[in-house]
Amino acid sequence: MKILIIGMGYVGTTTGVVFAKQGHEVTGLDIDESKITSLRKGKLYFHEPGLQEMLLDQMKNGRLQFTSDPNSAIENHDLLFITVGTPSLNNGKADLTYVKSAAEMIGRYKNNEKVVIVKSTVPIGTTDKVEQWIHQSANDPSAIHAAMNPEFLREGSALYDALHPSRIVIGSQSSAAVSELKKLYSPFSCPLLVTSTKAAEMIKYASNAFLATKISFINEVAKLCDQVGVQVTDVAKGMGMDERIGPAFLQAGLGYGGSCFPKDVKEFTETAQSLGVPLTILEDVEKVNQLQSHYFINRVKEVYPSLKGKKVTVLGLSFKPHTDDIRESVAYPVMDQLLKEEASIIAHDPVVNLSTEWLKRGVTQCWDPYVAVKNSDLIIITTNWPHYEKMNWARVQDLVAHPYLFDGRNMLDAEEMKNLKFKYQGIGYS
Ligand code: UDX
């Protein structure tokens, strides 16, 4: 099949590479020339494990190309995916500017019938609007077959998730669109659900909101664990053995970040609120998440009531491991609070470059974690990069000034760290 993907972020690029791998002829379109210039050179401009190699392979075999020219791209393709971003507006609602301009662009250059699939995470009712926006800006009166086909790709394992989906959801009122998508996804053996466009839009929000709820739930339980002296990791393990609950997304810590959960929870609650059916549980999910870094710093202050002049090593800047994405990364509110307490911060991350804003605020970036911990009064782990699990902690113990280790991701073995004479503290006892 000949496929056009509009929007070359991590979702669009990963989706395009995987479709090309399955033998389709794929074109990636973006209005951002710099992204297209980089991709044309075969260079992924963001960090996503395994994707760079597969991108090059697909470009070499001629099944994957990139363009910034919407005119010929839209004219020459009949199966179009919209994968542009839908960031949060200040009021919590999703910003549909990019989706609307992609739809209008399709309208402007449309020359015949098109199947248009929305993959971006969009509020309920948006796919219907996309169809209207296309028609309103089109001179060509031929039909649009619209569908909503949500993505469930996790950053850092987007390629794996695209190759091994847990389910495929197709929301459409158009039998032509459903039939094209069924053909496209026929190589996948996972369950395939066909619903209305609105249900598909809602499945994406409800799924992310539920996963965020699991995280905030276990984070509240962790606080109770701290009070009563119970390991939250044991509680999560025991809960997760119930197959109705499952073990995933029960890792207590500094809370969720990234480009999806925070914005999707906000959009879902805002929509529900505006329709007069508030999602009260979700409102609290967000509150719990926002308070988590404060709770953590208060625990730190039980050890150091004043952090003034203390040398703090922050390990991890990305919102999760295996990505260079820092959107809504909890490392930043943690560093903000530490700076307000007049601590001196050395930050390490295996891939993220600290922005000049943070450098100007006095944070030092260090690429070697062993140099970063030298003479440290306190180490804080903010991202569960495997690098930190593999560190030689006995060596670290020799390098630090004081052996305080606050593990905001509960990623290290508490007993092991205590045997190494660290004063180790995770979230939810230890
Ligand atoms: C998420 C969804 O998982 C994915 O299906 C959707 O398409 C996009 O949003 P992503 O944001 O990439 O993916 O990361 P995910 O692995 O879900 O983690 C989100 C955040 O939750 C991270 O900050 C992570 O550290 C945190 N988290 C996750 C926890 O704090 N505890 C957990 O148990 C799991």
Image: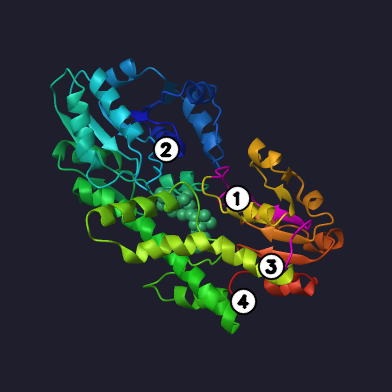
Residue identifier under label 2: 18
Q: For label 1, count other residues whose C-alpha is less than 10 Å away and answer few (under 14), some (14-19) or many (20+).
A: many
Q: What residue type is disc 4 on?
A: Tyr
Residue identifier under label 3: 301
Q: What residue type is disc 2 on?
A: Val
Name the secondary structure under disc 2: helix
Q: Distance between the residues labelled 3 and 2?
A: 48 Å
Whether residue 209 is in magenta: the answer is no
Residue 383 % position (x, y): 61, 55
Indicate which disc residue 272 carries.
none
Q: What residue type is disc 1 on?
A: Tyr
Q: How far apart are marks 2 and 4 (CA)?
A: 43 Å
In-image side of 147 versus 61 (left or right)? left
Name the secondary structure under disc 4: loop
Residue identifier under label 1: 332
Q: How far apart are marks 2 and 1 (CA)?
A: 33 Å
Q: Earlier in the sequence, mark 2 or mark 4?
A: 2
